[in-house]
Image (tube, rainbow, N blue to C red):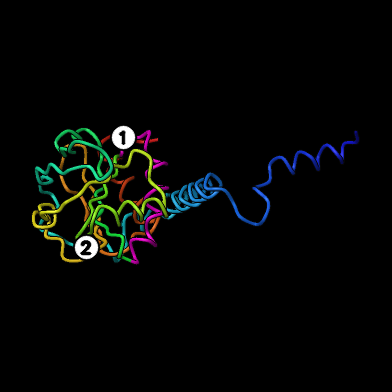
């Protein structure tokens, strides 16, 4: 076997599945690479770190996250947010009928995978939607690592946080204090920038 033949076979072994369609694993890897690349750019241009027009002022910033206990979407039991104390939390309000939620979902799941080992827990709160539709959304678009999905049928979270439109995303530090609110569809730069700011303040750096 020649070196050229070996190289050709090795390339074939490493290539994505045929037919022009990449497997879910390839899509996840691609998303993670994009998120990491954006993160590096954010560090390089750190004079704009954490600045984005979607980050909005809110009287909740600097206040404790509400004492919520919400039922899991796909398993028995409830998620008590007090039990997440000690972790950075990203709380995202979403619904299956929300088109911006579909657009931002890959960003959130990729970020959840990147930050899973750094003590960041993502929580998706279903907003004015039924469980079957929400599960169907996750079946179509995927589930994140270290990512909990919960229901809010009585709109407790919606009322406590004053949610008036989705998507909305809240960033909570390890002490349970709300550090940022993001209105509208997230993008990788603002997610990474905000998380890095919070982790740095908590002394959790790479």
Magenta stretch mostly in which secondary structure? helix
Instruction: Tell me which segment is drawn in magenta.
Output: 99-120
Quadrant in the rendering for residue 201: top left
Q: Quadrant of the image for the N terminus? A: top right
Q: Nearer the viewer, residue 23 or 61?
A: 23
Residue 65, image x, y percentages: 13, 46
> In this image, 53 relative to 25: left or right?
left
Residue 57, image x, y percentages: 17, 62
Which one is closest to the eye, mark 1 or mark 2?
Answer: 1
Q: CA distance from mark 1 to mark 2?
A: 25 Å
Examine the rendered structure and indicate whether residue 7 appears above or below residue 190.
Answer: above
- Which dot marks residue 203? none
**Dot placed on the residue nearer the N-terminal end, 1 or 2:** 2
Report which residue position mark 2 lands on: 56
Q: Is residue 151 magenta?
A: no
> In this image, 11 relative to 94: left or right?
right
> In this image, 180 relative to 25: left or right?
left
> In this image, 29 relative to 92: left or right?
right
Q: Secondary structure at mark 2?
A: strand
Report which residue position mark 1 lands on: 119
Quadrant in the rendering for residue 85: top left
């Amino acid at each position: 076997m020649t070196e050229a033949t070996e190289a050709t076979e090795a390339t074939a072994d490493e290539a994505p599945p045929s037919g022009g369609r990449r497997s879910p694993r390839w899509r996840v890897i691609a998303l993670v690479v994009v998120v990491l690349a954006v993160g590096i750019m954010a560090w390089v241009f750190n004079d704009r770190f954490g600045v984005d027009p979607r980050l909005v002022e809110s009287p909740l910033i600097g206040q404790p996250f509400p004492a919520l206990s919400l039922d899991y979407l796909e398993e028995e039991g409830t998620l008590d947010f007090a039990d997440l104390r000690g972790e950075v939390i990203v709380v995202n309000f979403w619904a299956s009928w929300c088109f911006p939620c579909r657009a931002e979902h890959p960003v959130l799941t990729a970020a959840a995978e990147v930050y899973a080992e750094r003590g960041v827990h993502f929580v998706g709160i279903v907003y004015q939607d039924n469980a079957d539709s929400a599960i169907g959304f996750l079946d179509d678009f995927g589930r994140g690592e270290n990512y909990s999905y919960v229901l809010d049928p009585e709109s407790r979270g919606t009322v406590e946080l004053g949610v008036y439109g989705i998507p909305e995303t809240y960033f909570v530090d390890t002490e349970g204090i709300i550090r940022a609110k993001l209105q509208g569809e997230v993008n990788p730069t603002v997610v990474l920038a905000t998380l890095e700011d919070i982790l740095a303040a908590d002394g959790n750096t790479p």
